[in-house]
Amino acid sequence: MALLLFRLRNVPDDEADEVRHLLNENSIEFYETSAGNWGISMPAIWLRNDDDYDLAFSLLHQYQLSRSQRMRAEYEADKAAGTAETQLSRLRREPLKVLVYLLIVGVFIYLSVTAFFRL
């Protein structure tokens, strides 16, 4: 029976590629499911052989630890160099998108507060 190893929803492409490469390097058979045409199914990596689960899980755990350390180091380096993305830089890059999100948040707050005071 197939075992779920790794969910792919909201996972960056480079991370998914690295996980696939890790499994291929260690000769672990797997297959993937996609989100489907409407994006409502679960995209994931599944193991074909139940016996590979312990090895695959430990490899994935080690990979995720090293990736999180690498990503944190890259962020700290970007932050020190002044190139890390901030809210202000995002506002400068995409002002319309930020303003639309702020407008949506404002509408939700308005509807929540007015509904409370009408009681």
Image: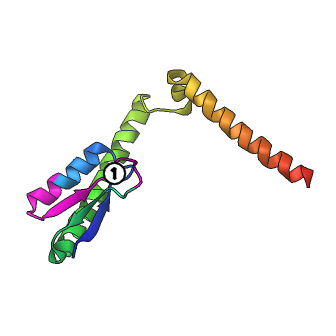
Judge from the rendering whether residue 42 lies leftward or rightward of residue 112; answer left or right.
left
Where, quadrant-wise, is the N terminus in this rendering?
bottom left
Whether 80 is drawn above or below 115: the answer is above
Where, quadrant-wise, is the C terminus in this rendering?
bottom right
Whether 22 is drawn above or below 4: the answer is above
Q: Nearer the viewer, residue 60 or 44?
A: 44
Residue at image coords 11%, 57%: 24
Judge from the rendering whether residue 34 lies leftward or rightward of residue 107; answer left or right.
left
Q: How many marks?
A: 1
Residue denoted by label 1:
36
Judge from the rendering whether residue 106 lies leftward or rightward of residue 24; answer left or right.
right
Q: Whole-percent x and y of residue 41?
A: 37, 57
Whether 90 is drawn above or below 44: the answer is above
Residue at image coords 56%, 28%: 97
**Which segment did they paint magenta?**
21-40
Coloured how? rainbow
Residue 23 drawn in magenta: yes
Residue 105 drawn in magenta: no
Q: Whole-percent x and y of residue 34?
A: 29, 53
How many C-alpha atoms fall within 10 Å of the one at disc 1: few (<14), some, or many (≥20)? Answer: few
Locate residue 45: give its quadrant.
Answer: bottom left
Residue at image coords 18%, 54%: 20
Q: Mark 1 is on which residue type? A: Gly
Q: Whole-percent x and y of residue 4?
A: 29, 68
Judge from the rendering whether residue 6 lies leftward or rightward of residue 115; answer left or right.
left
Q: Nearer the viewer, residue 85 or 36?
A: 36
Locate residue 62: give its quadrant.
Answer: bottom left
Q: Nearer the viewer, residue 85 or 24?
A: 24
Q: Whole-percent x and y of residue 90?
A: 52, 28
